[in-house]
Image: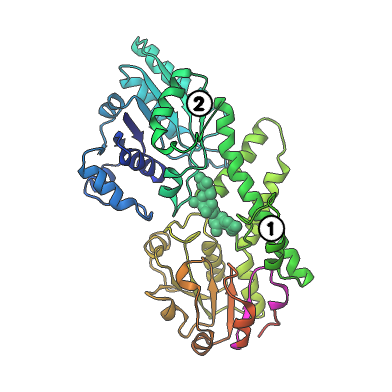
Amino acid sequence: MKVTVFGTGYVGLVTGTCLADVGHDVLCVDIDEAKVEGLKNGIIPIYEPGLEPMVTRNHKEGRLNFTTDAEAAVKHGTLQFIAVGTPPDEDGSADLQYVLAVAKTIGQYMDGFKVIIDKSTVPVGTADKVNTAIAGVLAARGCKTEYAVCSNPEFLKEGAAIEDFTKPSRIVVGTDSEKVRELMHECYGPYNRNHDKLIFMDVRAAELTKYAANAMLATKISFMNEMSQLAEHLNVDVEQVRLGIGSDPRIGYQFIYPGCGYGGSCFPKDVQALARTADSVGYDAQLLKAVEAVNYRQKETLFTKLERAFDGDLAGKTIAIWGLSFKPNTDDMRAAPSRVLMESLWAAGAKVVAYDPEAMNETHRIYGKRDDLSLVGTREIAAEGADALVICTEWKAFRAVDFSWLKAKLNFPVIVDGRNLYNPEDVKKAGLMYYAVGRGDSLQDSL
Ligand code: UDX
């Protein structure tokens, strides 16, 4: 099938590459010339395991091409995926200007039947707006070409995007057109062999499904983070509670890990956007707002623990941080808890020495060169001579630690673990103070 993908960001690039990899003829279009040039030469603007060789191979074999030529792109595909950004507006609602600009471009160059597919995360009602934008341009052109707009939200996790795309739990398509159903079956056929994963529904239901899925997952996390705070007050180990409730299949083990708050490009933005959508129709979405507020508070928890450990005196202290990205296997720093921690530490007059396996360039890009931030090449160098160690991201490389060695390296024996990676007994045996998340008795008095 001939497929066009607008936007070579995270979602667009993964979608285009995976569709090319099963044999579709894919043309990805972006307005950023440097990015398109880079992609043609195998330079991938994001870190995503497995993506680079897949892009290079499919490009070399001619099934995956990149262009800035919007006209050629519109003429190429029967399927036109819109996968451009929907950044939050000032009030947190999704900004649709890029989506609607693509819709107009499609209307401008369309010369035959097209299916326009909203892949970007967009609020309920966006497909109608895309429809209207295309209809307006077609009318101005005096063109009567047929088209259909459908919603096909993505459920990709960063760091596992290829796996999620190629082995999806479901493929949601919002449409009322039989022709679109057939074409989407053909497009996703290669991922749909063992059992039918396509779930067809109304366009607006598909749009809400995406937000509802992310909001549900964010709610699970905020619930557990709330439990972690309560557990600390009650002197209970929340990890035991996690195992106790996760064993109930109605609850499940996934997404109930307490931590230092959810980040990334989706949960914070989508929960906020859904709450704003609710406001816009006169409904006060109290649960969504609470999910957001609990997450915000949880991101402050690492700093609060450090303050407690040092009796409020962090000025002049050097704090080592292991892990900066919002989660492992990505270099994405968007809404990362490490940012809240670093910014609070700097405001308190402390210095940060940090190591992350992938996100150091990104951290440098965001914060530039500053005296109170050193980005170093290994976890060991970061810990050497620091006053305390904080773990913000659960990269695999942080799981096994010689705590006696660590005790010898740190100026003060303090570990603040935002991901509950270690057995409190092991840490404490080495003479370290261990401040984890919601682990009751592991909290100790300040130094
Ligand atoms: C998420 C959704 O999982 C995906 O389906 C959607 O398409 C985009 O948003 P992503 O943002 O890549 O994907 O990351 P995810 O693995 O879901 O983690 C999100 C955040 O939640 C991370 O900050 C992670 O650390 C945090 N998290 C996750 C927890 O704190 N506890 C958990 O139990 C699970």
Residue 50 left/right relative to 234: left
Dividing the image into 4 quarters, which one contains the C terminus? bottom right
Report x, y in % for residue 145.
36, 13
Q: Which residues are magenta?
A: 430-442
Residue 275's place in the image compared with 74, above or below, is below
Using residue 116 as the reference point, say whether residue 244 is left or right of it.
right
Residue 84, percent from left and from top: 41, 38
Residue 46: say if magenta. no
Whether label 1 lies within 8 Å of ligand 1 gets the answer no
Name the residue type under label 2: Ala
Of residues 368 and 189, the one drawn nearer to the viewer in this rendering: 189
Circle number at residue 127? 2
**Camera sees residue 388:** yes
Residue at image position (49%, 49%) is 265
Identified at 50% across, 84% down, the residue is: 402
Q: Position of residue 243 (x, y in %)?
A: 68, 63
- Nearer-N-terminus badge (2/1): 2
Q: Is residue 350 above or below residue 268?
A: below
Q: Which mark is residue 318?
A: none
Residue at position x 24%, y 50% in the image: 42
Can the viewer see residue 264 in this picture? Answer: no
Q: Of discs 2 and 1, which sits in the foreground? A: 1
Residue 82 falls in which quadrant of the image?
top left
> Is 433 a magenta residue?
yes
Label 1 CA crowd tier, 10 Å (few <14, some 14–19, many 20+): few
Which of the pair 210/250 is nearer the observer? 250
Instruction: Look at label 1 and name its amino acid.
Output: Ser
Name the element at disc 1: loop
Judging by the rendered image, the residue that carries numbered circle 1 is 247
Q: Nearer the viewer, residue 18 or 103?
A: 18
